[in-house]
Amino acid sequence: MNQENGQGTLDGGVEITQKQADVLEFVENYWLERYCAPTYKEIAENLGVKSVGWVHSLVDELVSKGILLKKGHRTIRPAHLTQKSLDKKL
């Protein structure tokens, strides 16, 4: 991610804030280590914040930009991590 003034651009040209990048990095690492999604509470704890609602809004923004995929209310994953790519790691 290229950064400037707390904002950055992903390789696909999508602009995200530093906090969104922090959420994305945590979710990616969590998926790669555990093959499941973190809870909003786990994301909040990792970011050092108490507001799960704030994390929810960050996740929703990343979903709307196509960076995270959401299935149901809770399951999120990075869009570039497909089931096929996860299966290769097992």
Image: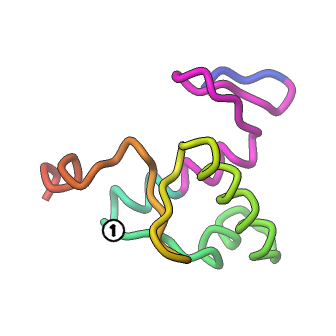
The magenta segment:
5-26
Q: Residue at x 55, y 77 (%)?
A: 73
Name above or below for residue 31 compared with residue 17. Answer: below
Name the spot of residue 11 as percent of width and height, x first: 52, 22
Name the spot of residue 39 as percent of width and height, x first: 55, 76
Q: Is residue 18 left or right of residue 25?
A: right
Identify the image quadrant of the N terminus. top right
Name the spot of residue 12 as percent of width and height, x first: 53, 23
Residue, disc 1:
34
Q: Is residue 83 left or right of residue 87?
A: right
Q: Is residue 7 left or right of residue 30?
A: right
Q: Residue at x 16, y 52 (%)?
A: 89
Name the spot of residue 71 as percent of width and height, x first: 45, 68
Name above or below for residue 1 compared with residue 58. Answer: above
Q: Is residue 65 left or right of residue 17?
A: left
Name above or below for residue 67 compared with residue 7. Answer: below
